Every structure is written in C-alpha cells, then in structure tokens.
Image (spheres, coloured by chain):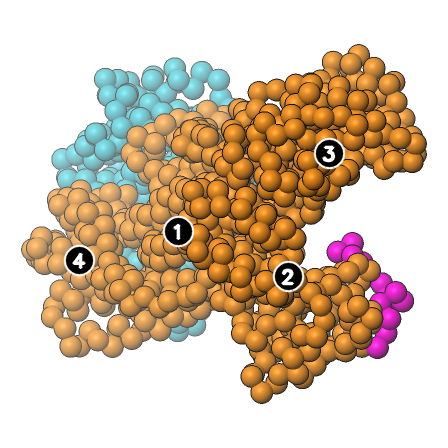
Chain colours: A orange, B cyan
Amino acid sequence: MRSIRLALRMLGREWRSGELGVLLLALTIAVAALTGVGFLVSRIGAAVAMQATQVLAADLRVESARPIADTVFARAARMGLDQARGTGMLSVVFDGERSQLTDLYAVTSGYPLRGKVLVAAHLFARGTPASAVPPPGVVWADSRLLAALGGHVGSQLSIGAATLRVGRVLISRPDQGGTFTSLVPNLLMNAADLPRTQLIQPGSRVRYSALFSGDRRRVAAFETWLRAHLRPGEQVRDIADTSPQIGSAVNRAGRFLSLASLVAVLLCAAAVAMSARRYVARHLDLVALLKTLGATRRFTLWLTTLELLAVAAIASLLGASIGYVAQAWLVYALRGVLAQGTLPAASLTPVAIGSLTAVALLAGFALPPLWQLSRTPAIRVLRRDIGPPPLSVLLAFGPSAGVIAALIAWVVLDMRLFLEVTAGLAAFLALLFAAGMLLVRAAARLRGHVGVAWRYGIANLGRRRTDSVVQVVAFGVGIMALLLLGIIRNDLDGAWRGSLPADLPNYFFINIPPHSRAAFIAYLHSHGARTSRMLPMIRGRLTAINGRPVESMRFPGRRGEHFATREQNLSWASTLGRDNRIVAGRWWTPSERGVPLVSIATEFERWLGLRLGDELTFDVAGDSFTVRVASVRKVKWDSFQPNFFILFAPGLLEKETGTYLTSAYLTPDQARSLAQLARTFPSVSIFDIDDLLNDVRAVMDKAVLAVQSVFVFTLLAGLTVLLAAVQSSRDERRYESAMLRTLGASRATVLKGVLAEFAALGALAGLLAAAGASVAAWFLTTHVLDLRYTFSPVACAIGFGGGIVLVAASGWLATRSVVNQPPLGALRAGSG
Amino acid sequence: MVGGVLTAERLVKQVGSPEGPLTIVQDVSLDIARGESVAVVGPSGAGKSTLLALLAGLDLPTSGRVLLEGHDLTALDEDGRARLRAARVGFVFQAFHLIPALTALENVMLPLELTGHSGARDAALDTLRRVGLADRTGHYPRQLSGGEQQRVALARAFVTRPAVLFADEPTGNLDSATGARIGQLLFELNADSHTTLVLVTHDQDLATRCRRVLRMDAGRIV
Ligand SMILES: Nc1ncnc2c1ncn2[C@@H]1O[C@H](COP(=O)(O)OP(=O)(O)O)[C@@H](O)[C@H]1O
Ligand SMILES: [Mg+2]
C-alpha cells in the first residue's frame, strides 16, 4: 500500500519529466501492432468462415441418397432456423434434336440460404445476383448447356416428361462445388416442377440435400441434435468441412501479418531493454537512498516494478485503442472487398493479448534489470562508483530469451518454423554484435588520422566500447528494419499484384481432341483470345513404387491414399514452364527423349513420401510404364496455366490416346464467341474462372494493404529503437559536455565532437544495416515469399548515408539541449 | 564499554585493489554515549566516510563488530539493518541526496512512510517549520538553493526522532556563510531532540562544537 502510493507519486513526477516516454512509446507500439493485427486477423478469419458458408449455400447441410426425414425439418423449424431443400440428379436434357447430359438441381424458395446465385441474359456474360429461385415452369441453364444445345434465353427444354422455358442464363450457384469437380453442365429449377418431370423413379440416383442457417449458437445446438439422430447414408456438412482456397490464402496472409507484427514487437523489445537500462542507471541513487532511509530490498523492487507496471497499463490501454482504430480503418478501407454482409464485430481477445504482451515484454526485458537495481548497496550514497553486482548471464538473458521464444512460438504456431526463426534470430544478433565489435575497434584505429573533433568523437566510441556496440547494433537494427521495409515492400507489392495480372487466363478448355488441336487454337486466336501453353492429358493409375504395389503400402494422409488409389492426370513436356521451378534433381535435356524419366510436383512428393530416383510404375490404358523420378518441381498454381503433378519426359506417352488442355484470356466481348466455339468443338469442356480470379484478386489486394499498414508499425518500432539508443547515452553526455566546457572547450567544439561521435556511430550502424537488410531481404524473398531476389546497391547506399544523417541528426537534436545547459547545473545534476 | 548507544569493536575494513588488499579502516574501537556529539576529522582519504558507513550499517566490516543500541549490526542481514536504520538512524550528506521527483514535504515524509508511521504529513510539516521552510513545502529540490536543500535534508533526518544522526560533511557543498547557518541548525535540532551525533567534517568550527573530536589518519584513530 505504501509502495503503491509512493510509486504513483513518483510515476506522476517522472512522467512529467519525460523520463518514461521512450518506454511508454515502445510498449504502446508493441501492443498496437499485436492487437491491430490480432483484431484484423480474427475479423478476417470470421469473414472467411462466412465465405465458407457460401460454398455450402447454408451454415449446415445434410445430404443423403434417400429423402431426408420430415422430423429433421420440423426440428429445425422449432429451433428457429431457416431452411431450404435441394434435389439433384443427372439427366439428359433436350432442345429439339440436340441433347446434353446435365446436372439438374431443383430447389425450394429460400435457396440459397448463404451466398448468391448469379444469372445473366446472355451466355458467358457477367452475372448479377438473382433475388429469388426460378419460378415454376422456368429453368436457369448454364452457358455450357445452352452452348451445347444451341439454346438461349427463351428456349424450351425437355426435361424428363416436362417442357420448361429457359428464363435466365445460370452463371454460378454457391454450392456447385469446386471449379473442376463437375464436368457436366448445370441447370437450376424450381422443386415444384420435379413431379411433372417424372424423373424420380425407384432406382434412379438422386441426391437429396437439406439446407439450414441461422444464429450461430442455434445452428450449433441443432447440429449436435442432428448428429445424434443421423440415419444411415445421411451426411452432415458444416463450415469445418469446407476449406476453400481463398480461406487458406487469407490464413497465409494472416500468418504473414502476424510475423510482420512480431518483428515490430521484437524491435519494441529492444527499445524496452534499452529504456530499462536507462531506468536502472537513473534510479541507482534512489534505491541506495531509500535503503539508507530504511527501505527493504523487497520494497525497492516493488516500488520500481509498480512504476513500470503502471506504464504497462497505460501502454496497454493506449496501444489497444490505437490497434482497434487501425483495424477499424483497415476494415473500412477494405469494405466491399471482404465478404458480402457485415463483418463480425471485433472480439476483445486481442486486447487481453496486447496487455499480456506489454507485461511479458516488461517481465522479460525490464524485470531482470529491476531485480539487479534492487541489489544496489546502500553504501552508494557515500561512494557513487559502487553499483549493484552484475546479473548472472542466466538471469540477464534468460527471461528475455524466454519471452522472445514464447512470443515467436505463439505467433508462428509451427515447430519447424519456430526453430528456424529463433535460430536465425540468435545467429543474426550474434553476428551483429560481432560485426559491431569489429567495426568499433576498426574505427578506434582511425583516430590518429582525423581532426580534433573527430578524434574526440571516435575516442569516445572506443572508450565506451560495450555501450558503443550496443548502440551500433540498436541503431543498425532500427535502420535495417526501415531498409528492409523499403526493399521488401516494393518486391511484395509488385509480386503479389504481378502474380495475378489483369490478362491472366480466365477460361480453361479441357478434352480438346488431338486432331483438332491446331484448329481449336486457331479459332481462339482468330477471336482475339490470348492462349497459354497446351499440354496433353492422359489418364493413368499409379500401380507401384520401387516395385512395391501401392495397394500394400500405407500413406500418411488422405491425399496420399487418394493419389495411390485413383486415376491421375498425366502429361508430358519437353520444356519447363516459367511458373515451375526445379527444387531437386534436374530437368531433362533434348537428348533424353524417350528415356523413362518423370518430374513430380512438391505436393506429390510430400503426400506420397517420394524421393529423387524412386521408380514409379503407371498403368495407362493397359500399358505399363516404369519411370524414374528425375526432378521435383515447385509449381506456382496461381499462374492459372495448365499444370500437372506428374510430367513424363517426351517420347513415352505419345502413343497413348489422350486429350489436350489449355487456358486463355478472353475479354467479356470475346467471350461471346464461346457459344459458337462450344458448337464447333462439342467435346471440349469450357470452364469460366473469372469469378474465382476476382475473389483471389480481392484477397491479394487486401493482403497487400494489410501488410503495408503493419509495416507502418514496424517503421515506428524501428524509430523508437533509434530514440532509445540516443537517450541511453544522454545522461553521460550531459556530464561530459559540462566537464569539457568547464575545462574551457567552446560550445561549438563540444557540439562538433558529439556530432562526430554520432556520425561515426551512424556510419557503422548504416554499414551493418545495409549488409543485414540485404541478407534478410534475400532470405525473405527467396525462402518465405517465393520471389526472385535482386540486390539493391541503391538501398545499401541509402542505408549507409541515411544512417549517418539520421543518427547524427537525432543525436544532435537529443544532445543539443545538454550542451546548451550551463556547466554548473549539469555538473550538479550529474553528481547529485 | 558496553552501555553506549553506539559501540565499535576492533573494526577493520579491507578492500581489494590492483595492488592487493588495501586496509582502509584499521582496528578502530570506540564507544559513544547517548546524547554525545562526536566529530571525526582528518585528511581526505583517511577513511572517515568508510568508518561512518560501517557505524551506520551501510556497509559491513571485514572484521570486528558494531553495536547500535545493543543490536549487533554484523549479525543482521541487509534488510534487518535497513529496518533498524529506518527506526533509529538519521542521515545528512554532503550532496543532500534529496529525491528530485518528490517535493520538499514528500521528501521529509518519506522516512516516516517507510516505517508505516501515521500522521507523517503533520510531523513532516512541523519539522519543515522548525528548519524555516514552512512556505517551501510544495517545492521540488531543483527549485531550492543548496542551503535550502540541506535544510530539507536536516528535516528529513530529524523527523523520525532518531537515536543516532550520521552526517558526512554536511557543509562541504555550501559556501561558508550558508554552511555556518546549516551547522547552527544542525546543533540546535540535535540539542532539542537529544540525538547522538556522529559528524564527519573538514569544518574546524563545526568540529569544535562537538563534545569529542576523533582524528583519523590512514585508517586509524590517532
Ligand atoms: N570500496 C572501495 N574500494 C576501493 N577503495 C576504497 C573503497 N572504499 C574506500 N576506498 C578508499 O579508501 C580510502 C578512504 O576513503 P574514504 O573513507 O571515503 O575517505 P574520506 O571520507 O576520509 O575522505 C580512499 O582512498 C578511498 O579511495
Ligand atoms: Mg569522505
């Protein structure tokens, strides 16, 4: 109680003197960075979950081959859930003479409960959301179906025993499945028309689905009941079952954001550590005096801890508010890009996490120095040169290392990445210190060759060697963060936007017969489309690995099972696409034509646990091929070019019958010609991925903006480190400059000396930063972001020159007032 | 010898130095009676401050022991000595050692608050009045002159009514006129509160006001 009162009183006073400013700033930025990103990621995560429900067209759905019991619907109604029914089957649809196998989907009103059905007036046109389901007597047929039948809006289609009019062109419905899962065209109709078609007969294959949506808690309660009352053959699907690609993209972006915010937090930790050092230096006399007046050691520890805790509390509040405002602004800036409907409200968890961070940073970086501070002996009141005994290495670095490790572990949530990041960080810091030590030593040799001000400045560097190294490293890390930011930001921005240029292929064509390849491409070109490469596609089955039949083998995951048991799409190629990168082995040479070699994608390698040199045996329409794994490729799937997990060397599969596959970019105008194309090449299946692309583009834009805003926090953190480094030597400088002036040095001389020292510091730090940022940028671009690294001499020059200017300027600003003080006041303040 | 308020028995203080162990207090024994005033004088570096620190329990001797009102300081741990100081000892230093973050009043209240004393505020105000600073209670140390700061320090030292007051060159940082007034005040307060005074000083006037003068040289009392 006494200590709290005294602590608050001292806090109030030290507050006004600006003593705790840097510490508060560092903690605030750390909290703001973490909570801002935390808020954003949790809200985007919730938005992604909402997007996922759109793929289900509901929050929850039940599927079965038999009609779903009425009790299920009754129960849902009683629990206040919205509901709709869907009935799906394959059937041949006729338009006069022409016919096409079609996926029929009959729905009741209310469908879809989540997401939107997109319709248009013309084939392959851009869709607009439909406000209701097709009315009885009317169907919505998709472009592929109408193209195959030669139909249009207004055509009369025979479906079973009924004749129904095409009211709109169906562009997409939310639950039509992944882009390539269904090879047959789609048709949406009203459930009321089903009996008239007489298509449902005993033995016909029908998929019944029940769709439910509503308040999250009620849906969860209903799901629990449902799972307990499931009948054989009934399947429940909820959000957890769907993992849309966009979701994983957002997850990745979230991870990246968290890592970026972690960098900001670590920088802040450095600033906190330096502020704490300064705090200790400035409170040695106080602790000694308190002890002289009779305070126990525990009391002094309490007092200083309380004071810093109060700072942490203020920082948490301030930081969390800034973080909240920052993410609210981001969400506002991203409105329309995020999921339709309102974004779920931000939860309060990030605030708790933010405050926890502030306390953890203090505990790790400030508590050990405070503990040391409390060991200051009382005798210091009589002999100022006596300080507390040094901390043991374990105590000095253990807690901070522990806190850093915990923070990294918490952010990356992945053991391997955790080990990589921590090992990298430790090595990096060790390197920085070693380099800083060398640089400071090298600078000391220079002092004989420079003028008096510089000699004084450099002599100072050498005299306070440890302090100088700490400062060089701190300045260096701060400048490095700023540099890295500049280098990476451009790369990242360009690469993310560049990976999805506007003219990315937006249509896929599969099942192109080999003999009409040339004609098909010619047709597309004549309509102005830009085509990508064309690759053959042959169905085949993996039968053995290194002579062992795959049926007798076990694979780690479902994916591996899948590859081992199902038919695969195989292809061959003589050249490697630019969206493929060899990560192991080598690509074949022209002279290896006909040599039994295969190149596999990294995913295939991992899922089946394969190695370079493994022998794979494939069965292709009765012919057996045994091929050796010659290379592993990392495929950029988001290039939207035709790509295959398994590529054979040329000269092996040519004799097998297969089809071809390509993709192309068509403008909306050019896309009109696709109806004609579908009639000319009836066997070719056309896939429109424009909507998917737009979604992915939106996510990318969002990620770029979010990353940039997190970098702002990193920037601020870097500046705080600079500030802390300048401040840390301020007291000593105050005393020294007063001494020098008392000895007769002019103000200008003292100032020049200080300037020289800081410029030297800045040059060393800039050198370190330029080298460090280059290495870090190389690592990040090539290992984390999968981009190409280009060395930037300009950035290095900026780092070096900027280091000198920035550090000298900030040093000068911070010290100017010190030099201006009359010597007597400074001497008294310095010794009293 | 036992019976005095402060007793030192064969005190030795050695410290390590690059040239081997250095003895800075050598075999000092003394006995100070309650209410007595003792001046310790001697050349700079003689070991006066070190002896003062040992007597006050701010530091521990290499050998020998110190009894303060019968408590063996060498047998107490750091916190034990601190508690004893809080209750029974006051200090005045050459460099004033006020806490810059606290006002004059708060500085004087501090030792009372450390012992959980109720009515700290009134006692502190009263003592400040006695040192003539009734109208400066809300000022911070840097707003006060050196003499005023030392008055605050005196108030802080006497506010707990200590059994022993240690002063290490209390006028060393002051000009002679101010120093004389501070010395005057110190002895007035001392007489009023019947405190035992141990005073290290270079100031001949101050030393002669004490009942006993101990001369130190090279760590010994001569
Ligand atoms: N902890 C210590 N380490 C090294 N030397 C010390 C230490 N404490 C005191 N001294 C030395 O002992 C001598 C006596 O110091 P001090 O007691 O301060 O003298 P005085 O107060 O009489 O001027 C001085 O030379 C001083 O430098
Ligand atoms: Mg002395």
In terms of sequence position, does the residue under pointer 1 or pointer 3 come before the other?
3
**Image position, residue A546 (x, y; %):** 80, 77
Nearer the observer, A321 or A533: A533
Real-space CA distance between mark 1 and mark 3, rounded to the nearest whole angstrom: 43 Å
**Image position, residue A135 (x, y; %):** 66, 18
Measured along the vertical axis of the image, is residue B208 above or below residue A545? above
At x 52%, y 68%, the residue is A577
Real-space CA distance between mark 3 and mark 4, rounded to the nearest whole angstrom: 80 Å
Question: Mark 2 and 4 residues: CB-CB less than 8 Å, in contact?
Answer: no
Q: What residue span does the magenta drawing correspond to?
A: A547-562
Q: Quadrant of the C terminus of chain B?
A: bottom left
Mark number displayed over residue A755: 4
Real-space CA distance between mark 2 and mark 1, rounded to the nearest whole angstrom: 40 Å
**Image position, residue A362 (x, y; %):** 49, 42
**Which residue position holds label 1?**
A493
Disc 1 CB within 8 Å of nearest ligand 1 atom: no
Closer to the observer: label 2 or label 4?
A: 2
**Which residue position holds label 2?**
A513
